[in-house]
Image: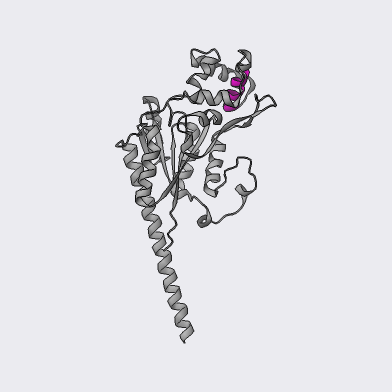
Amino acid sequence: MDTTLPTIALVYDFDGTLAPGNMQEFGLLQALGYDNPNDFWNLCDQIAKTNDAGGIAVVMYAIQAEAQRVGLRCTREMLRAFGKKVEFFTGVTKWFDHINTYAQQIGVQVKHYINSSGLKEMIEGCAIAHHFENIYACTYLYDAKGEACWPSVVVDYTKKTQFLFKINKGIREVSDRVRINEFIPTEARPVPFERMIYFGDGETDVPCMRTVKSNGGHSFAVYGNDKKRALAQQLLSEGRVNFACAADYTENSEMMVIVKRVLDKIKADYTLTQHEVENRDTLNMYAALGDSLE
C-alpha cells in the first residue's frame, strides 16, 4: 500500500472567522484618526457608491490615502506592526498545534491556509502567521521609498474561489496564469477538494463554502455574534455548508470535535480508496498471469 500520508488543507477566512471584527480595527484605523471605526467604513461606502467601485479596492485606497493625510508612512513594516495587535477568538492561538498533533496521531498531514479579503501584510505580522502554508490576501505594490502606491492583489469572492483551485493544484504564486488553467487529472492534484475543509463567516465566503462542499469537501460557517449566527444558520439550512459552529477554537469545543471527526472520515476514505486500488491491481496481476500461462 502507498505509505504516503494524504494531505488535508484547512483553509480559513480571517476577519470574523479567526479574529473578531476587521483586522484594521485593532489600532490601524485609530492611528489614521478614526476613534470610531464606523466612520472609516462609512467613508469607504461613500467612495464606493460615488465612484461605482469595488468595496475591497476602496478600502485599500482609503487606508493609503488616509495614511498620507495624517503623515503616516504606509509601509510593509507599518502594516505588519499593526498586525501584531490583532486579537483572536478564544482558542485560536493553540488550535493549530492541537489539529497538527491529532493529524499526526491518525496518520494524515494537514496544511493551513489563509484565504482572505484582508491585508496580507497585517496577517503576516500577526501572532499566528507562522502556522500557514500560504497566505492568499490583499496586498500593495510599494514604491522605491517602500511606501504603498497601488493595490497589487485585490481579493473579492471571485478571487477567493480561484485561490481554492491554486491550493487544489499546488500553486503558491498569485501571479501564476499558466498552471492554474492547465489540465491536471483529479487524482494527480496535491489537495483534492474532498480533502479540503473551509472556514468562513461572511458573504464573500459563500462561493468558497459551496465549491468545497459541492466537490466532496467540508465547509464550516463560523459565527462570533448573533447576527453572524443567523447567517450561519441560513447557510446551513440552504445546504451551502456542512456545519455551523460558534467561533470557539478551544480543545473540547464543538468545532474541534467535529473537525477531528472530519479528519477521521477523510483518512478512512483515503485508506479505503487505497485498498480498492490494491485489490484491483492484484486481480489484474492474476488475470495477466493467467493469460501468460495459457
Q: Measuring from the top left, give residue 114's x and y in whole percent.
A: 49, 37
Q: Is residue 71 visible?
A: yes
Which is nearer the eye, 155 or 54? 155
Location of residue 120 with respect to 294 vertically, above or below: above
Q: Is residue 235 left or right of residue 167?
A: left
> For the view shown, which residue lies furthest in the left direction?
252
- Decide whether the magenta segment is chiefly helix, strand or loop: helix
Location of residue 184 with respect to 291 vertically, above or below: above
Question: In the figure, residue 226 lies in which quadrant?
Answer: top left
Q: Does residue 230 show up magenta in the picture?
A: no
Q: Measuring from the top left, give residue 242's x and y in whole percent.
A: 38, 42
Q: Measuring from the top left, give residue 286's x and y in whole percent.
A: 43, 77
Q: Could you tell me which quadrant the N terminus lies in? A: bottom left
Q: Is residue 237 visible?
A: no
Location of residue 144 with respect to 69 vertically, above or below: below
Q: Is residue 261 left or right of residue 155?
A: left
Question: In the figure, residue 199 lies in which quadrant?
Answer: top left
Location of residue 51 with respect to 191 vertically, above or below: above
> For the view shown, which residue lies furthest in the right direction?
144
Start and end of the magenta stretch?
A: 54-65
Q: Measuring from the top left, give residue 55's x and y in whole percent.
A: 57, 26
Which is nearer the eye, 134 or 164? 134
Q: Is residue 21 left or right of residue 180?
A: left
